[in-house]
Amino acid sequence: MALGPLLTYYCDKMGKKLSVLLYLVIFTVFAGGCVTHEYAYRLPTYEIPLEKGTVLRSINLPADLEEKILALDPVSVSGKDINEVLFRTPAPRIMNIHGGIYPVFLLMESFSKFLILMGYPEDKIRNPADGSYSYSCYENSGKLAGMLAWYYEKEGLRPIIVGHSQGGIQTVKVLHKLAGRFEKELPVWNPLEGKEENRFSITDPLTGRQQPVVGMKISYATVVGAGGISRFLPNQWVMMNKLRSIPDSVVEFTGFYMGLDVFGGDLLGFGPLNKFEPDGAAAIRSVKLPAAYSHIFVPLTRHLARSRETRDWINSYTPSEEPRLTVEFKSSSMNILWAADVWHSIKKHWVLELQNLIRAKRNPGP
């Protein structure tokens, strides 16, 4: 069995924290293996030149379904709403950015599969070029920003970013790239061809106007375990004084931190230094997870969607700034507070983006 499936199997089978030592041992034994994904996904809009209205015309939802979507309350989306309404719709592209050392990407793969089991479209999580479930924190942040612009232009819904550990720092760096805090121009990046395009703007799929990559706004971003000693790594030095400041290149942002977090917490995750602040109009939440949560293993969540009781609890969750679990489950509830909060926001922005798209179709501008 290849390294990737083997580690994923044991992570999900055990449903508890694996030690870093175990990861390193397994990695050493199976170092000759490689993780590959056989996957192909293409939308018609990926391959054709776009003009005003192209993407809107390509998304044909029945009138009764549009009315049901418009009637949804974005902050109170139930499991029934997903099963009866949202499963029939497109969804925003989710860019999951994993942390640094090799096996950690499997934890973000677990989170991706949690989202899929909860009802999120698989094709809006996996990379259409190679089928991977997440992006590396070592990917160039300008490239990731250009890729987000490409996805928005081709798919019609503003993307979402989820970052873990160094991937969280990279997420904030991407937001600063989109806000123009580093360069005044960024090229559009084509993920299918693996190269930048000879342009610095996209055709906004809702308005038909030219939208520069720098200045574009995504719908939601969230990070967990971003900070601590990780910010002293050479690839993160540029974020030293920018990490806790969130520009208005995102509509809503949630930053998670936890006590006793050596790797991702400032002052071990205690105190106001771990909180994020808006540098613009973005809506910001800082959420303190219990100190028992592990910096490394927070994204290990696939098991939560396999249990009916935890799945139902997650779908009815109400966000809190300092959540506590007050119920007991027969199955493992590891990382449920983080998973529930992120899922709540993803559902919210799924609905909001669909509602924006429907209104744009019904009321096209000049």
Image (tube, rainbow, N blue to C red):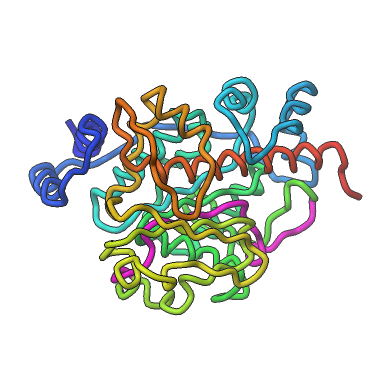
* Above or below 174: residue 11: above
Q: Percent x, y for residue 324?
A: 40, 46
**Residue in front for this viewpoint, 65 or 255:** 255
* Above or below 358: residue 86: above
* Quarter residue 37 falls in: top left
Q: Residue at x 76, y 28 (%)?
A: 66
Taking the image as drawn, is residue 130 in sight?
Answer: yes
Q: Residue at x 33, y 64 (%)?
A: 264
Left or right side of 341 for 24: left
Taking the image as drawn, is residue 132 in sight?
Answer: no
The span shown in magenta is 208-230
> Would residue 30 be counted in the magenta stretch?
no
Q: Residue at x 15, y 48 (%)?
A: 19
- Residue most toward the front? 326
* Above or below 238: residue 169: above
Q: Percent x, y for residue 148?
A: 56, 53
Q: Which residue is drawn at 29% across and 43% down?
A: 106
